[in-house]
């Protein structure tokens, strides 16, 4: 869902020359700036290595819900999957800014009681050690999908559909608790261009970036 929002903002931004996506199927979008690489194995990028260099930034938005998952399975599709991509990108693009979509409540100590938060924290910490020009961890909380963005996790999609009328009002009333997919995408572009004061960005940090742009 976040990835759809980020992609939209990149395609709309006149300062972005090329946007390359990597996915298991086509997005269905038509845009002269967009090129799509179809790839099935998100744990191995050797066969598409030639298509992975020459980029200024990576917006890494892949992720799954931890609902009903055991820790080893969740770590495989969170930590292992992310590091497989990030490691090869760091080698091919040392000038790259890498932005990872994590989540509010992530546990940087990797020792807390909440499984998903430990795994996300482990992933963040490993990304920050890679030799990118810069790496930033985005930790959004509640997200309001806009412009047709939708979660591919069925239970989340249902929740967002039911909560849509409420989210708009909450976003206006509590701007430091809720971000839209549009706002997250714009903030990621800001960070890609000029960096941020901190490497781990909570909702209030993301909101501050957006205010500083106006």
Image (cartoon, rainbow, N blue to C red):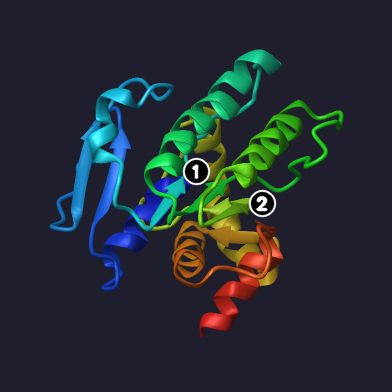
> Residue 119 sits in which quadrant?
top right
Q: Can you give x and y, in whole percent of width and height, for residue 150 in the image?
A: 42, 43
- Which one is in front, 161 or 43? 43
- Which one is in front, 169 or 213? 213
Give above or below for 172 relative to 135: below
Q: Can you give x and y, in whole percent of width and height, for residue 2 in the image?
A: 47, 48
Count neighbours of disc 1 (C-alpha within 10 A) and say few if under 14, some if 14 to 19, many if 20 or more. few
State left or right for residue 168 relative to residue 104: left
Give above or below for 1 relative to 12: above
Q: Residue at x 27, y 61 (%)?
A: 11
Residue 149 visible:
no
Residue 45 visible:
yes
Instruction: List the residue tagged with mark 2.
Output: 141
Instruction: List the residue tagged with mark 1.
Output: 161
Give above or below for 73 relative to 62: above
> Residue 65 sits in which quadrant?
top right
Q: Which mark is nearer the camera, 1 or 2?
A: 2
User: Under tag 2, what secondary structure?
Assistant: loop
Q: CA distance from mark 1 to mark 2?
A: 17 Å
Q: Residue at x 74, y 35 (%)?
A: 117
Q: Which mark is residue 189?
A: none
- Which one is in front, 42 or 68? 42
User: Under tag 1, what secondary structure?
Assistant: helix
Disc 1 or 2, which lies upstream in sequence?
2
């Amino acid at each position: 869902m976040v990835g759809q929002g980020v992609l939209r903002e990149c395609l709309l931004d006149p300062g972005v020359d090329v946007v390359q996506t990597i996915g298991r199927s086509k997005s269905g979008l038509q845009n002269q700036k967009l090129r799509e690489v179809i790839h099935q194995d998100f744990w191995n990028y050797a066969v598409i290595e030639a298509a992975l260099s020459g980029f200024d930034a990576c917006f890494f938005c892949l992720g799954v819900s931890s609902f009903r998952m055991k820790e080893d399975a969740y770590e495989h599709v969170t930590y292992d999957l992310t590091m497989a991509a990030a490691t090869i990108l760091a080698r091919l693009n040392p000038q790259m800014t890498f932005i990872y979509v994590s989540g509010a409540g992530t546990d940087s100590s990797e020792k807390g009681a909440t499984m998903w938060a430990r795994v996300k924290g482990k992933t963040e910490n490993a990304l920050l050690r890679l030799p990118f020009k810069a790496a930033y961890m985005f930790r959004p909380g509640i997200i309001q999908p806009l412009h047709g963005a939708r979660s591919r996790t069925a239970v989340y999609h249902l929740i967002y559909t039911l909560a849509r009328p409420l989210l708009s009002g909450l976003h206006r009333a509590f701007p430091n608790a809720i971000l839209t997919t549009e706002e997250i995408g714009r903030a990621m572009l800001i960070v890609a261009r000029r960096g941020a004061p901190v490497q781990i960005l909570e909702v209030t940090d993301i909101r501050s970036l957006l205010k500083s742009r106006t």
